[in-house]
Image (tube, rainbow, N blue to C red):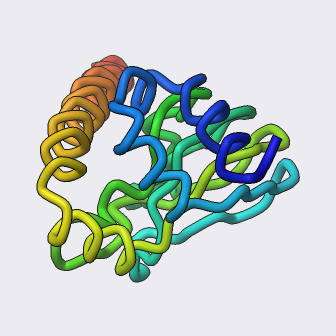
Amino acid sequence: MNETAALIAALNTSWFSSGLSEKAQTRLAELGRRFTAEPGTQLFREGDNSDIFGILIRGRVALRTLVPERGDVTILTVEPGDVYLWSSLVPPYRASSSGVAIEAIEAIVFDGAALRAALREDCELATALYPRVLVAVERRLHATRLQMLDLFATQQVKEW
């Protein structure tokens, strides 16, 4: 199996990219590359430039944000099949959280600038991908909202 076919097979394990047209999957595979990291690896930091877009194939990534007086707090754990650093597609292209591999990970990553250029040039790819990015953002917002409710509930109990 050549590398493009192997990347397409890996992409099909993800809710994010399975079911895309063959053309869209091939284009993504041509833009992507495999990435691995060991547990404890700092993948990106809140506020830094988002230079990549990643689809997690195996492992888990903790998304953390700095909370005053509490330090880094995990707000969400990215599971296999989900995406991370979607901010590489949205100006100003800055990470909205920090990411740490909490298990050995395998991902398919895309250079943010190259992916944005491909989306500008290929309307079919953009039409297929952007709704999925919005679903990923919605899932992230929902999970973060639940985490924040839990955080505030814990603070309120301590104050009583």
Give the image location of residue 156, x and y in percent.
27, 23
Residue at position x 27%, y 71% from top? 116
In which quadrant of the rendered view does residue 5 lie? top right
* In this rendering, position of residue 58 left or right of residue 65: right
For the residue pair 140 and 53, the one nearer the viewer reads as 53
Q: How many marks?
A: 0
* In this rendering, position of residue 110 left or right of residue 145: right
Image height of 119 relative to 59, above or below: below
Give the image location of residue 53, x and y in percent.
45, 60
- Position of the N terminus, as image quadrant, is top right
Image height of 85 relative to 11, above or below: below
Question: Is residue 152 something that shows in the picture?
Answer: no
In which quadrant of the rendered view does residue 112 lie? bottom left
Give the image location of residue 81, x and y in percent.
54, 28
Residue at position x 51%, y 61% from top? 98
* In this rendering, position of residue 154 left or right of residue 34: left
